Amino acid sequence: MTRFALILLTSTALTSPAFADMLDVEKPDLTLGFIKLTDMAPLAIAYEKHFFEDEGLYVVLEPQANWKVLLDRVISGELDGAHMLAGQPLAATIGYGTQAHIVTPFSMDLNGNAITVSNAVWDAMRADIPAGADGKPAHPISAAALTPVIDSYRAEGKPFNMGMVFPVSTHNYELRYWLAAGGINPGFYTPGDATGQTGADVLISVTPPPQMPSTMEAGTIDGYSVGEPWNQQAVFKGIGVPVITDSEIWKNNPEKVFGLTAQFAEENPQTVLALTKALIRAAEWLDADNGANRAEAVEILSRPEYVGADAAVIANSMTGHFEYEKGDVRDAPDFNIFFRENATYPFYSDAIWTLTQMRRWGQIDAAQSDDWYLETAKSVYKPEVYLEAARMLVDEGNAQEADFPWDTDGFKPATAEFIDGISYDGRKPNDYLQSLPIGLKGDDTVTIAGVQG
């Protein structure tokens, strides 16, 4: 039994109802990192509503320049934990890019991203997008509508460039999924090509989230995949059109997680429980009473110390609607889910989906067994810590018993709620990879010459 598990068992004994308010946190003073996106909201709310302080934690929230800097500072100990891309703890743990064992006891949200293209690209796509009964573009929009645009760029000898926030981000995998579902090859990563552009019809590169609109406006990229408020910012500035949200690519897909090093978790188990309790309360507050608190959340997030974007821009997605083309505002009650649908529970099946996409595009360069996918997920995702924190909140009267998946085995039911209708079952990752028309499967490898299988 690991030291972490032993300490967790001890903490369980100390957190019966009689001792519910007596978590003896090992490190009360914490510095936590985040990127300026609306899905950092649980951190901001836990701070502003004093949920951290309720757990004996005194937290400094510190914005970071980009995802790499954020991860590096968590690994070095300059940050005690952070708002992370779902792929970052998994990639670091298996040694892709950076080697470090990162764990997560808390999933921060579902959905929250979109794909935006420039006005010029939208104008060129528009003729190939069918109209709905109201005359507006019918959603979801297939990436197949981009094919004539890419072909025209190729004929002119120009690359078609798109941005995403980080190589192991959901934004990258969602963009690639959307393109591939429309018959467009987004390219592969190889040992000699860390850009992921081998064999690509579209060149995808990294751009920090707040710089997405200005980079597209300058013509450096023709579109991008990013979280809010940077898609709605393009609409407000009149420089681009969001063509699809990630919930239209995969309904209720996992997005960010709260990550910290395994060493920190082993050395500070009571602190991790306290952090998880505070974050669960913040997420529940964000979704309470059918979003009654969202307007207040928007005001908080608009402050310069958090997201620092105009409140009207943030509100466009945080309060139950989303604007595509200027004036085309549609209901989107699930654009940001922070607590409903068990959004905060760290499901193994969510981790495994991310790992399948790493394999699909060559970041995992060799075939792995189904057992390997599960073992890797279990080494990073810590639902036992989450449920311990949830039990404490219920016993204290700060949460409802019915709000947590006590009996889950860590897998969501198989689902085909993807834009291409392909079914995903987290228990069978290799079968899933085999079912995807574009991407690595089986013993396939990829070199600069292309896929070898």
Image (cartoon, helix red, strand yellow):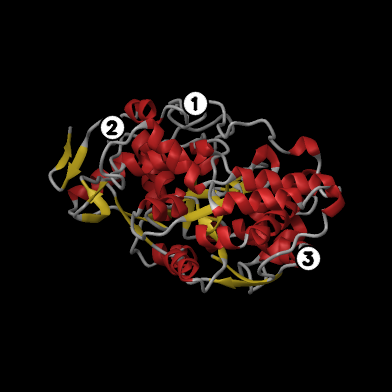
* Nearer-N-terminus badge (3/2): 3
* Nearer-N-terminus badge (1/3): 3
Q: Please state which amino acid type lies under the numbered disc 3.
A: His
Where is mark 1, residue-wise? 416
Q: Nearer the viewer, mark 1 or mark 2?
A: 2
Q: Please state which amino acid type lies under the numbered disc 2.
A: Lys
Between residues 395 and 330, which one lies in front from this camera angle? 395
Q: Could you tell me if residue 237 is visible in this image? A: yes
Where is mark 2, residue-wise? 441
Measured in 3D between alpha carbons, the distance from the residue under mark 3 to the one under mark 2, in whole angstroms, is 48 Å
Q: Residue furthest left?
A: 449
Where is mark 3, residue-wise? 50
Q: Please state which amino acid type lies under the numbered disc 1.
A: Ala
Secondary structure type for disc 2: loop
Q: From the viewer's perspective, tell me whether residue 3 is left or right of residue 91.
A: right
Secondary structure type for disc 1: loop
Residue 138, image x, y percentages: 51, 34
Measured in 3D between alpha carbons, the distance from the residue under mark 1 to the one under mark 2, in whole angstroms, is 19 Å
Between residues 310 and 273, which one lies in front from this camera angle? 273
